Amino acid sequence: MRTFLVVMDESQEARAALRYAARRAVAVKGAVHILAVVAQQNVSAFGAVQDTIEQEAHDRAEMLANGIGGNLLAESGIMPTISVKVGNNQSIVSDFLKNHNEVTALVLGAASGNPGPLVTHFSAHAGELPCPLYVIPNDYDETSSDHEV
């Protein structure tokens, strides 16, 4: 089954990427995998504080991904798979792609002006990726475009 991987955060561009991935998944009878990455905290002097901060960030990311996943199910009929990982965005996504052969496209949203660190990194290394990279502008509205799904 074709799986579209979307790296999710609270940004508008991530939501645009998710909408795009969902429409593609519906068109090919595929799936969507939402990956929420929580930045690792560097508060090493207070290990318990660091653990608490990371757990709270993990919980927030999980709630965001589950909420968006529920919206996706209601809008498209697709129930996404959701993963929440702690670490460096680029490393987590690269490792995920290496370990999940079912991913047929990495779908990222680009902010206006500066597209963001993930788009910058992965577009510079697109030739090394195991799948195509789709970069979706944050204000892209496929429903008003003349493209067919």
Image (cartoon, grey):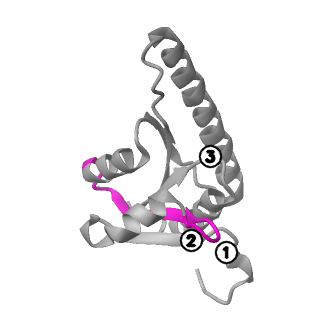
Q: Does the segment drawn in magenta span residue 107? A: yes
Mark 2 nearby-residue class (10 Å; few <14, some 14–19, many ≥20): many
Looking at the picture, tell me which residue is in the foreground, 27 or 143.
Answer: 143
Residue at mark 3: 69
Give the residue at x 60% y 23%: 56
- Quadrant showing the N terminus: bottom left
- Distance, label 2 to label 1, CA atoms, is 7 Å
Give the residue at x 67% y 74%: 140
Q: Please tell me whether residue 101 is drawn above or below residue 40 in the rendered image.
A: below
Disc 2 on helix, strand or loop? strand
Looking at the picture, tell me which residue is in the foreground, 97 or 80.
Answer: 97
Q: Pick whichever of labels 2 and 3 is earlier in the sequence.
A: 3
Looking at the picture, which amino acid does disc 3 mark? Answer: Gly
Q: Between tags 2 and 3, which lies in front? A: 2
Give the residue at x 48% y 21%: 43
Mark 1 nearby-residue class (10 Å; few <14, some 14–19, many ≥20): some
Boundaries of the magenta span:
99-115
Q: Position of residue 149 (x, y in %)?
A: 58, 80
